[in-house]
Image (cartoon, helix red, strand yellow):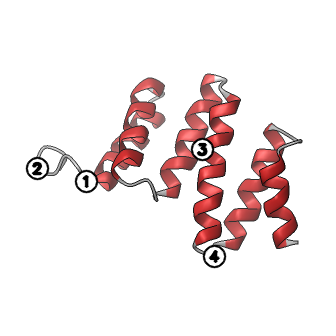
Amino acid sequence: MLKIEPENYQALFYKANCFLFLEKIDSAEFCYKKVLNINPNYARANLNLAEVYLIKGDKQNAIKQYIDAIELFHKNNFNEEVILYSKRVLEIDPNNKISKKYLELYN
């Protein structure tokens, strides 16, 4: 599919998921970043890229990706996801002000 449609972000997302499953972390990271270049509003790619960063031990970039996803969820009224991933960020960084702000909005 990607040979026919190299900008097909969904096919690229599934390719990234395969790389992640196979523990080819750098390849997964590359593909998730490409997905987000094509479609910056694809929250699931942000979440999966955050997981890649956590695997790599890069908490700051993981938090950034989670926050990007949270903001997309908030914008689209996916309130449960905002709460869930705000809590996830606070597990990584208990002092994260952005996540605390979102949890205050929804509690």
Q: Secondary structure at mark 4?
A: loop
Give the residue number, with chain letter if any, for mark 3: 65
Q: Earlier in the sequence, mark 4 or mark 3?
A: 3
Relative to residue 103, is residue 78 depicted above or below?
below
Give the residue number, with chain letter if any, for mark 4: 77
Give the residue number, with chain letter if any, for mark 1: 8
Question: In which image quadrant can residue 92 be found?
Answer: top right
Give the residue number, with chain letter if any, for mark 2: 4
- Name the residue located 42 percent from the left edge and 41 percent from the top edge: 32
Q: Which one is closest to the eye, mark 2 or mark 4? A: 4
Label 4 near label 2: C-beta < 8 Å? Answer: no
Label 1 near label 2: C-beta < 8 Å? Answer: yes
Residue type at tag 1: Asn
- Name the residue located 39 percent from the left edge and 31 percent from the top edge: 30
Label 2 near label 3: C-beta < 8 Å? Answer: no
Question: In which image quadrant can residue 26 be found?
Answer: top left
Residue 62: x %, y % from top left: 64, 37
Label 4 near label 1: C-beta < 8 Å? Answer: no
Residue type at tag 2: Ile
